Image (cartoon, rainbow, N blue to C red):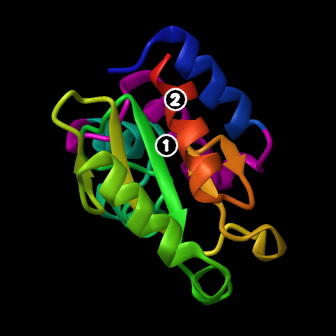
């Protein structure tokens, strides 16, 4: 279900924990699986659970709790906007509304060309940098004005 390379990465994560606690690697294993597959289908979650000797429901609970895991196919670029209270008070809601208008989609939707998916996120731990966006779970963008959002979208389209 996963490539030998991904399994090696998961094995390295498992090795960080006592032998009887390999389920502690569930978040890392899900991240690795998602990197390979693009999203976490039920079959992928079940495979990870079996690999970690866990009930599938326990792994699904982790995958469905955190917004960095995607349980459905997405656009090529996932943009997550923090709308938690500190960001909301510092322009997060405006940034989200501007992105919705620019992309022509709402939260949890993908543009018709498959380029962008827009997500609403909880605290990203950068309240002083609000409003903040996260691109594909890896790139944090801070102080996102309309001009900076325009530039980000242009860069992501390249």
Residue 108 marker? none
> Which residue is drawn at the image coordinates 49% and 56% (left, top)?
80
User: Which mark is in front, 1 or 2?
Assistant: 2
Q: Can you identify the residue that label 1 sits on?
A: 30
Question: What x and y, as percent, mark residue 22?
Answer: 63, 48
Q: Does the magenta stretch include residue 24?
A: yes
Mark with earlier residue (1, 2): 1
Can residue 122 be seen in the rendering of this structure?
no
Q: What residue is at 74 percent from the left and 57 percent from the top? A: 142
* Span colored in magenta: 16-43
Q: Position of residue 67 (x, y in %)?
A: 46, 61
For numbered disc 1, what is the local secondary structure?
helix
Q: Which of 140 and 130 is in front in this view?
A: 130
Q: Give the class, few, some or many, for how many residues have Cα within 10 Å of label 1's Cα (few <14, many ≥20).
A: many
Residue at the image point whose x is 80% and y is 42% from the top: 16
Residue at the image point whose x is 51% and y is 10% from the top: 4
Horizontal side of 119 relative to 80 (left or right) equals left
Residue 105 location in percent, x, y? 23, 54
Q: Does the magenta stretch include residue 42?
A: yes
Image quadrant containing the N terminus: top left
Nearer to me, 58 or 99 = 99
| Residue 154, disc | 2
Tell me where residue 44 sits by quadrant. top left
Q: Quadrant of residue 117?
A: top left
Q: Where 135 sits versus 132, above or below?
A: above
The relative height of residue 15 versus residue 126 in the rendered view (above or below) is: above
Q: Disc 1 and disc 2: Cα gap in Å?
A: 30 Å
């Amino acid at each position: 279900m996963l490539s030998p390379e991904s399994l090696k990465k998961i094995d390295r994560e498992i090795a960080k924990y006592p032998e009887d606690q390999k389920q502690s690697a569930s978040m890392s294993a899900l991240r690795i699986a998602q990197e390979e597959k693009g999203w976490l289908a039920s079959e992928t979650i079940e495979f990870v659970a079996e690999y970690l000797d866990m009930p599938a429901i326990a792994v699904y609970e982790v995958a469905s709790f955190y917004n960095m895991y995607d349980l459905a196919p997405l656009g090529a670029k996932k943009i997550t906007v923090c709308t938690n209270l500190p960001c909301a008070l510092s322009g997060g809601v405006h940034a989200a509304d501007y992105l919705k208008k620019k992309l022509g989609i709402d939260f949890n939707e993908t543009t018709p060309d498959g380029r962008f998916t827009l997500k609403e996120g909880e605290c990203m731990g950068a309240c002083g940098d609000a409003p903040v966006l996260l691109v594909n779970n890896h790139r944090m963008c801070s102080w996102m004005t309309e001009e900076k959002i325009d530039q980000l979208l242009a860069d992501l389209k390249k």
